[in-house]
Amino acid sequence: MIGGQAQEECGDCCAHGQAAPEPVDWAAVGEASATRAVYRIMSMDCPTEEALIRKKLGSMPGITGLEFNLMQRVLIVTHELPATAPIEAALIAIDMRPEALDPNQDLASAPPAAPEIPWSRLIVAGLFAAAAEVFELIGEGHWHPFGADPTAWPGSGATPLSWLPPILAIIAILVGGLATYRKGWIALKNLDLNINALMSMAVTGAVLIGRYPEAAMVMVLFSLAEAIEAKSLDRARKAIGNLLSLAPEKATVRQADGSWLEMDSRQVAVGSRVRVKPGERVALDGVVVQGRSTINQAPITGESMPVEKTVDDTVFAGTINEAGSFEFRVTAGANDSTLARIIHAVEEAQGGRAPIQRFVDRFARVYTPAVFLVALLVATVPPLFLAGAWSEWIYTALVILVIGCPCALVISTPVSIVSGMAAATRHGILIKGGLFLEQGRQLRCLALDKTGTITHGKPRQTDFVELGTIGTASTLTLAASIAARSDHPVSRAIAEEAAVKGVALREVADITAIPGQGLHGVIDGQRWYLGNHRLVEDLNQCSSTLEERIFALEEQGKSVVALVGEKGVQGLFAVADTLKRSSIEAIGELKRLGIKTVMLTGDNEHTARVIAAQVGVDGFEGNLLPEDKLAAVERLGRDGKVGMVGDGINDAPALAQADVGFAMAAAGTDTAIETADVALMDDDLRKIPRFISLSRATYAILLQNITLALGVKAVFLALTLTGQATMWMAVFADVGTSLLVVANGLRALRQ
């Protein structure tokens, strides 16, 4: 959903000059109203189409408001018309074919199907454009409608090779650019000089003066950029779809007669009683009313270890019940659950960050019309008012068109960006668009998730303290034998450490779990307990000295369990999510680049403080839910561009809201990877400083290209107006500059 801020940004880039509307109230969309019409428009997915729709509908009598959701390709029209036919006719007139939607339809649960991107046509067009360039270089002549060479006309002895470049180029333009020409013509008819209109005029001008290969290549590059932009939006929609799949469609609900019935989770009322079996996902938010269990809350809170749940504890939709069975009372419907809020937050953050208009689009709004106007004045004013020769001044105007064509800018920008992206890929950094590579240089702050990002995300045994008299080997063997019979993450960490050390396990009889405390079993006729501090207290084996040892380990952010037998506590085992060595190096490099670092985590304040001190971040926040992380990123963004690094579904809203979202691709969830703008393929945070450095270097090359392109054109434009430039000079200024900026742009590959 695009709110007021997003509309303001979109208004700037689209230059429609109207005040930003109020944010869309999607709840209100669901209320049938005679003054609201809801449409899905498959061809509306960027601010260019939004501006055209605004211009067409904004001045229509009876239209009182327009709201856009580019993410879902939805338009909401508030009107006072007796029927919607005029609205639909106006949309069809600008080639925006509307599909009327039921106002009660859940837009998030019914995302639009991705339109087919004509990749095959773009490939064919690119091949023809490349062939035109090749034959132009090896051809024998340069044919164009205004050519002075009579041998270039049909039947005048021109060689077949001289015909190939124009034929191949025109085929490329027709195959790859008909959609652009259609949009450009509609825009011109509606007096909207948008990028499609400007591109159509620039390509047509290049064709009319004989620059066929260049015209074809510009059209192919532009069409390719449009396709990539559409593909990126589809990735975002897919991320929302992945989130929706987290919550189960069915829930086992207690009926009035005491029986249990499996129901659609969307139909379960608040206050209902729901039963959850081991291994099932929790369908709705609620409060436990009976039973105990261990729940993996990582999808929601990002906590590194499962959490024990008992009566009166809160459970979240989308979390996983790992052990035990319990019943809970529903506190929020399917549309109001924490997971639903995450989905809406992702959608709002993705839609709210309207695509920034490309440099060529912004520049062309002034530059290209100015060039056409200058050329027109040069071609007409001297012959009409200064007794100049028509042929001479038309020729001069054509030279100006060749010099003024923004082809060098169109070509140099993607070459620089794509080269930088290719260099990043070589370093294991996947960037989803040139926009994010360009924005990397502007980052002032980086927010980082803890679990799986700064830390390994997997508990490991970090400490062993021998306290009893049975010896180290026996203590390790007994503890590992019991731990190996449990699926709890702390027990698994102890068992894995023992396996690494080659500890032999013993047979355990009568193994029994103690909910929320640990477990016990019989080994060689003696009962042994392996559990937490509370279990030690219940066994009356606690002492002030033991508590000091336990607290010392817990102050380091570690979970502590004890092995207890008939002769008391024999040993302590500490388990923690360990810090990645590369994280410390990455934070140091970021500081040297002038980037502020803040850790955001769902873990408790104590654990967060310990990890923050170890890694060296500038600040931290703990006990954060996904919406809290989103709010934190919004706050940090007030002081400049902010990046976010994460690996979990719970990080998705913050990743989407950040100016640049980084996903840990090796261990991260699909949703985090799809939502993020940059994926670190080997989960190494040191890739981020490299990305920022690469972004700054690429931007420097981009500025050099822009300065070079405009500088050369300015020099030759001055020569043309003073009568010192010829057509071959114009060709040199245009093609030569293009070659120079391309060569310079390729330097980014060596970064």
Image (spheres, rainbow, N blue to C red):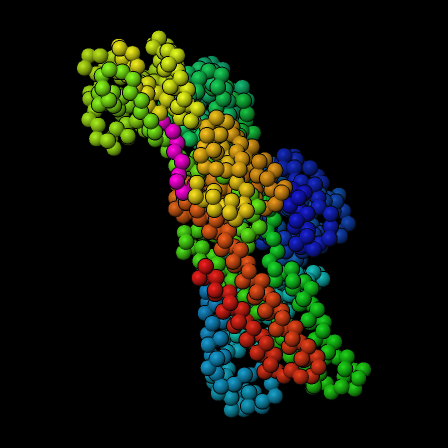
The C terminus sits in image quarter: bottom left
x 60%, y 42%: residue: 637
Answer whether residue 724 is visible to the viewer in this image. Answer: yes
In the image shown, does 19 or 478 lie closer to the viewer? 478
Q: Position of residue 324 (x, y in %)?
A: 37, 20
Q: How many marks?
A: 0
The N terminus sits in image quarter: top right
x 72%, y 75%: residue: 376
Relative to residue 706, is residue 260 depicted above or below? above
Q: Position of residue 735 (x, y in %)?
A: 55, 75
Answer whether residue 643 is visible to the viewer in this image. Answer: no
Magenta segment = 575-583
In the image shown, does 297 or 741 lie closer to the viewer? 741
Q: Check the image and name the residue furthest to the right.
A: 385
x 54%, y 62%: residue: 701
Horizontal relation, residue 85 to residue 213: left or right: right
Q: Position of residue 77 (x, y in %)?
A: 68, 45
Task: Based on the picture, tell me whether residue 117 belongs to the magenta stretch.
Answer: no
Horizontal relation, residue 375 to residue 326: left or right: right
Q: Check the image and name the residue furthest to the top.
A: 540
Relative to residue 151, is residue 67 depicted above or below? above
Horizontal relation, residue 718 to residue 112: left or right: right
Task: Based on the picture, tell me whether residue 576 belongs to the magenta stretch.
Answer: yes
Q: Position of residue 543 (x, y in %)?
A: 37, 11
The quarter of the picture where residue 545 lies is: top left
In the image shown, does 602 or 67 lie closer to the viewer? 602
x 62%, y 69%: residue: 710
